[in-house]
Amino acid sequence: MNKTGSDGIRLSSMATVRTAMAGLGALVAVAAFAQVPADDLARGAQLVQKDCSTCHGLNGQGASNEFPNLAGQNEKYLAKQLRDFASGARTSLVMSPKATALDELAIRGVTKYYQGQTPVAKPTSDPMLASVGAFVYERGNPYSGLPGCVSCHGTGARGHAELPRLAGQSPQYLERQLKQFASRARSNDGSIMAVIASRLTELEMKAVVEHLGAMK
């Protein structure tokens, strides 16, 4: 969860235009975008089915809380993460070798495919905790100087080219990422998140990820 807050980093938003096309029979739906050739999308869908679906699912819903949901994630953000895994800027024993094996056409196809899938949010199991998270997301903690997540991630937490979609993400996955930012085990997305994550109390962290996981 990246924030700029008082650091004043300007974040650009981007809109994508999407049409639908069928692909790979009944199992895989390929999202068709005018700027990407259909064969690139088909290749991306094939790679998803072959190499990505075990963990991230054909429809972009993670197979377990160990893996992020990728459905609806911005293609440019996803592409950056894949390049970071390949370069070593972000480390993962699973993702680094897989990302290294992808060329730019494959990255473009895979990321377009996942961006075109429909996110599915799961209702919270703890509405009271989620309500605390909603406060933290919108207003932060004015008593500790913690800015609201909305100042960077926006209303709806849908993400864009520079920031990830957080709405509907696995709370357990989000919590692990926040802890990695706080400990600086993850630093590929700038220093702002390290500062913000380190300011979160345990309650604030668990509450905000619970809220985000239930957002549609």
Image (spheres, rainbow, N blue to C red):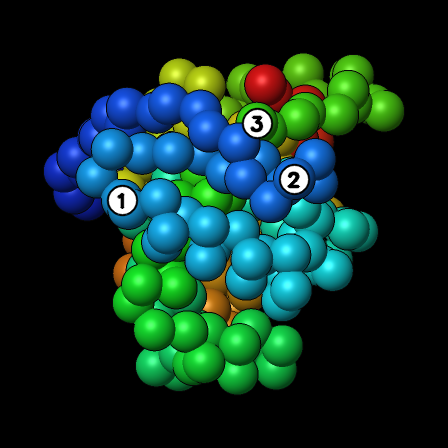
Type of residue at label 2?
Gly
- Circle 1 Cα neighbour tier, 10 Å, few/some/many (<14 / 14–19 / ≥20): few
Type of residue at label 1?
Val
Say whether residue 52 is left or right of residue 182: right
Question: With respect to residue 135, does 144 lie above or below?
Answer: below
Residue, far front? 25
Is residue 63 in sight in this rendering? yes
Identity of the residue drawn at 66% across and 46% down? 58
Reading the image, the residue beneath label 3 is 118
Residue, far right? 125
Q: CA distance from mark 3 to mark 2?
A: 18 Å
Q: CA distance from mark 1 to mark 3?
A: 19 Å
Identity of the residue drawn at 45% across and 19% down? 156
Identity of the residue drawn at 35% across and 44% down? 38
Residue 147 rendering spot, x and y as whole percentages: 37, 32
Residue 36 marker: 1
Reading the image, the residue beneath label 2 is 25
Identity of the residue drawn at 17% across and 35% down? 12
Question: With respect to residue 13, does 4 lie above or below?
Answer: below
Residue 84 rendering spot, x and y as whole percentages: 36, 71
Q: Which corner quadrant of the image does residue 18 belong to?
A: top left
Tag 2–tag 1 contact (CB < 8 Å): no
Quick one: quadrant of the C terminus?
Answer: top right
Type of residue at label 3?
Thr
Is residue 146 in sight in this rendering? no
- In the image, 147 versus 64, the foreground residue is 64
Q: Earlier in the sequence, mark 2 or mark 1?
A: 2
Q: What is the secondary structure assignment of the residue under circle 1? A: loop
- Circle 2 Cα neighbour tier, 10 Å, few/some/many (<14 / 14–19 / ≥20): few
- In the image, 70 versus 38, the foreground residue is 38
Q: Earlier in the sequence, mark 1 or mark 3?
A: 1
Q: What is the secondary structure assignment of the residue under circle 3? A: loop
